[in-house]
Image: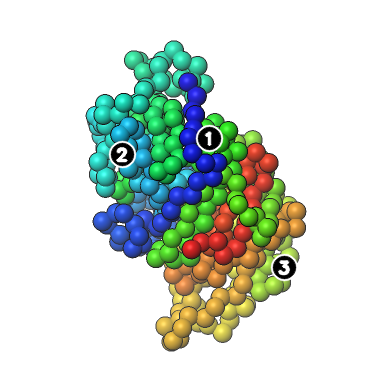
Amino acid sequence: MHAWFSGSNVTSIRLVSRYGPCSPFETKELPSLEQILLKDQLRVNYLLKGVAKSSTDDSKVSISAMDAGEEYVINVSYGTPVLEQTVTIGTGTDLSWIQCKPCNVCYPQEQPIFDPSQSSTYAVIPCNSPTCSQHQGSCSSSCAYNFTYIDGSNSSGVYSHDRLTLSPNDTIENFLFGCGTDNKMVFQDAAGLVGLGRGNLSLVSQTSQLYHSVFSYCLPSTSSNTGFLKLGEPGDDSNTVYTAMQTNSTFPIFYFVDLIGISVAGQQLAISPSVFRSGGTILDSGATFTYLPPSAYEALRSAFQEQMSAYPLKPPNGILDTCYDFSGYETKPVPASITLHFGDGVTLDVDSSGILFDDCLAFSANQVVDTGVIGNVQQRTYEVVYDVGNERIGFAPNACS
């Protein structure tokens, strides 16, 4: 049984910060910087779990590794009749899942938990189906999944099919997802997540005939602004620059880019491209900050501090070790510009909102492995286009509303 579609070949869904005024959640309290830093370290450890183990004190974090940094949410609907569900998006996973009744263990969520018995289009994946064996489901009476994350939290339930409604005019029939009845994590009111990774379970893969394996998003500059998640090719990509999407056999589900250099205030730093290429660089929607190989980060930090030498430093905040005291200034100074350079001549000028986070340089050294991660802070205000079929990633500036 394969997914089939009705609607247009491009659909756009409003994307908002879970903590901003547009968030559907009642609890909009921002986590502390300490929580964000710990969450982000869990997130990066989760991404690189093949070679890295968590070195943080996980007991301090009440949010799971999968949720760490997943700050942006969209509304979609499951079932017939439709039940709206607010879910996070994630480029670091392929399986989409939501909490389902009857819950053995479920965390509190904002909307009613999905009840498959109330949907006329719901079906479980049978044990003996090729779909079950293809996705390595375990079997008793139906095809089960169990995802365990690095901090010990997990989601488990059954592989299922149902109608997924992305907008009033765009529906996907027989969408394959996880119906989770055991969800041991604190997921901050969201019903689950939509997986946008490169695996064949992802929303991107399942809708490839309709949306041609293209999706994009724009993450807003502040939590008060809105962005979007778009499925399908951009209407006008005349101001989009494309860099080659890299593939890494160790992490086949992730989106890698060929980062080769960094400039500060227009001056490219003396870092050999091999420093970045040895472990590769993941482009990730879920990590907050950008993590660089230590020698690359040290060069960036030194040049940035030199450009910002007019402003007093304040003590480091966890992994963010270049922090400034702007308390004596009526308006915050514009930070020194930072540009990322990719292997095919493409450059990305990081928006000023993505350079400092809580008055600290929003970059850090990845002390665990030499793989880099470009986080969502540095992607703000750009439409980031994932053209999976043509193996390229695009950047278009000033794209959010």
Can residue 66 be seen in the rendering of this structure? no
Q: What residue did someone put label 3 on?
A: 268
Q: What residue did someone put label 1 on?
A: 207
Name which residue type carries label 2.
Answer: Leu
Can residue 234 be seen in the rendering of this structure? yes
Q: Nearer the viewer, residue 172 or 21?
A: 172
- Going by the image, does 102 lie left or right of 366? left
- Where does residue 69 sit, x and y in percent of width and height? 43, 53
Name which residue type carries label 3.
Answer: Gln
Q: Nearer the viewer, residue 9 or 188?
A: 9
- Going by the image, does 268 lie left or right of 18? right
Crowding around mark 3 (Cα neighbors within 10 Å: few <14, some 14 to 19, many 20+) is some
Q: Nearer the viewer, residue 266 or 317?
A: 266
- Where does residue 182 sit, x and y in percent of width and height? 30, 32
Q: How many marks?
A: 3
Please tell me which residue is depicted at 34% across the width and 33% down the height of the picture.
79
The label shown at residue 83 is: 2
Q: Nearer the viewer, residue 398 or 183?
A: 398
- Where does residue 310 sit, x and y in percent of width and height? 56, 84
Name which residue type carries label 1.
Answer: Thr
Asked if the residues shown at circle 1 and circle 3 are in contact, with their CB atoms under 8 angstroms apart, the answer is no
Crowding around mark 1 (Cα neighbors within 10 Å: few <14, some 14 to 19, many 20+) is many
Please tell me which residue is depicted at 52% across the width and 21% down the height of the picture.
134
